[in-house]
Image (cartoon, rainbow, N blue to C red):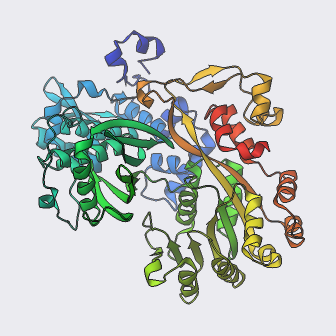
Amino acid sequence: MSGGPAETLALAPSERTAVVARAPARLSGRRLGEILAEVAGLAPERLEEALAAQRGEAAGQRLGEILVRHKVVGEADVLRALAIQLDLPYLERIDLERLDPELVKRVPINFAKQARVLPLGREGGAVRLAVVDPLDTAAQDSVSVLVGAPVAPEVATGQVVLDAINMAYDRAADEHDTIMQGLESEDLESVAHELEEPADLLDADDEAPIIRLVNSLLFRAVKERASDIHINPEEKDISVRYRIDGVLREVIRAPKRFQASIASRIKIMGGLNIAEKRLPQDGRIRIKIAGKDVDVRLSTVPTNHGERIVMRLLDKSNVILDLAEIGFEPWQLKIMDGLVTRAHGIVLVTGPTGSGKTTTLYAALAKINSPDLNILTIEDPVEIPLKGVGQVQVNPKIELTFAGGLRSFLRQDPDVIMVGEIRDLETAEIAIQASLTGHLVLSTVHTNDAAGAITRLVDMGVQPFLVASSLVGVLAQRLVRVLCPECRKPYLPTREERDQVGLSDEIWAQAGNPSVIYKSAGCPACQQTGYMGRTGIYELMLVDDDIRQLILKNTDSSTIKHAAASRGMLSLMAHGAYKVARGITTVAEVLSVTAEDLH
């Protein structure tokens, strides 16, 4: 393709962020499989398998979709090949600075996100249009009508287009630079109204400064991938912090005089009592931001300087429900597949709060969810709705506890049961009885490692023989931040550093004997943090006959852990070291979450 490395570097900085690749004439019009063989190294036998599937069980599906689903090639490879086949430009990135805001305004955000299209600008008599599916001519015709001109499609991946759409429509709102100017206290009771279907905050036209401030804080948090917003009143002002990739970062300080108004506005949104300031309160807010459905769990706590507010954000459109995408290695996936497809037994996920246990359980349920299985869950709270799964939220006020819900489930003819957490002996015993009577039970326990889950159950009062006969596998996990691909810096680790994180010669070889590992740097793309997103590291222990014998003898967790390691179990630190060697994360990140493995 044209636009290779030398040509790319020759572009001006603003042009370099939107590299356009044109197809070489010799490949234009060739079959998609032939193009993929040349540009993506597609093996002939894998192509034949996909074609056979297209003639059989996947009849009617596109070849590219089949190849991506089978993980033979990536989405970017298929779209690049499609662009070559159709002789269309391929966009590596979209330069937001060169977008035409007038064209963007003419295309509604919901349509843009659904059709995955974004007008870029005018060129000649046509409008350049970023598309994910160049064969979707109906969407292109609709855009042509909206902008009043013919469109010239340019191909880009779904992630590139959707990210550009969110950024473009966020800019259209343009509230961030002026939100703190001229704030005045207002009576927020007049804006207290509850809607069955939440309005998109980007479409809100409320003029009240406090309302605009709270809206701005919410959709900026979503845009920056924050999981929590902390509003902390201090002696002279209010600190607002976002938790991004597990780390808190201050984003703004508001004047102290707006403290009561901000708290009242947020409490009204969450349906809380704005007059009650002496007791903690919990609530929930449903909002839409840039077309995304976002659930907000709200908590207020009275402190000596006023009410402290924490909002936990769950972007439903950004939830990963695929075990392969949350950090499992192929050999771990194979073991997990065997565990979650069993007919009976207990599978436990362990780790501290915020280590991603619930996400892993949801991903496991999503993998096995099918019409021929009756799956029931009891959670605190229900975070992600799963189609076809019966989900129940605990409610201690009416004595609907984990144990009570679990007991009722057994009369509902379930195949799979998910319990949010095993906290007490009653819940543990009912879960064990359910597993022994032919049900698969998934749950979580708060322990540091996989072996610790066994001793925790025994400490609760469960008889060791019941643990040994019901438990089939335990997964311990942590989340580590992923290095920003734009700015990570390679370096050669010292032997001491390799030993510190457990980066043995065996793990080094498994990772392909890399010449370097990487450390964080910081750039605008990652907001100078050096990291972008998080991934999991896992310690997966299968309960085999030898482990069962140790459980029956009431053996301590360290002995069980050593026995499991001797049978090939990878510890949390060892899996972290493997990810360090592959350039995914850093030594510091792994050490920060696996300190207990050093003892």
Q: Position of residue 82 (x, y in %)?
A: 40, 37
* Residue nearest the viewer, comparing 96 with 441: 441
Residue reaching furthest to the bottom: 411
Residue at (44% x, 63% y) in the render? 384
Location of residue 117 (image quadrant): top left
Extreme residue toward the left, this view: 148
Question: Looking at the picture, how far across and down is residue 115, in whole percent?
Answer: 28, 48
Instruction: Please name the residue shown 61% across and 34% down the image.
Output: 585
User: What residue sits 45% from the left and 31% below the top?
Assistant: 526
Q: Is residue 215 above or below residue 163?
A: below
Q: Nearer the viewer, residue 520 or 306?
A: 306
Name the one closer to the observer, 316 or 155. Answer: 316
Q: Is residue 213 above or below residue 413?
A: above
Residue 250 at x, y = what percent? 40, 36
Quadrant of the rendered image containing residue 171: top left
Number of numbered labels in the structure image: 0
Query: Which of the image's four quarters has the N terminus?
Result: top left
Is residue 521 found left or right of 573 in the rendered image? left
Q: Quadrant of the C terminus?
A: top right
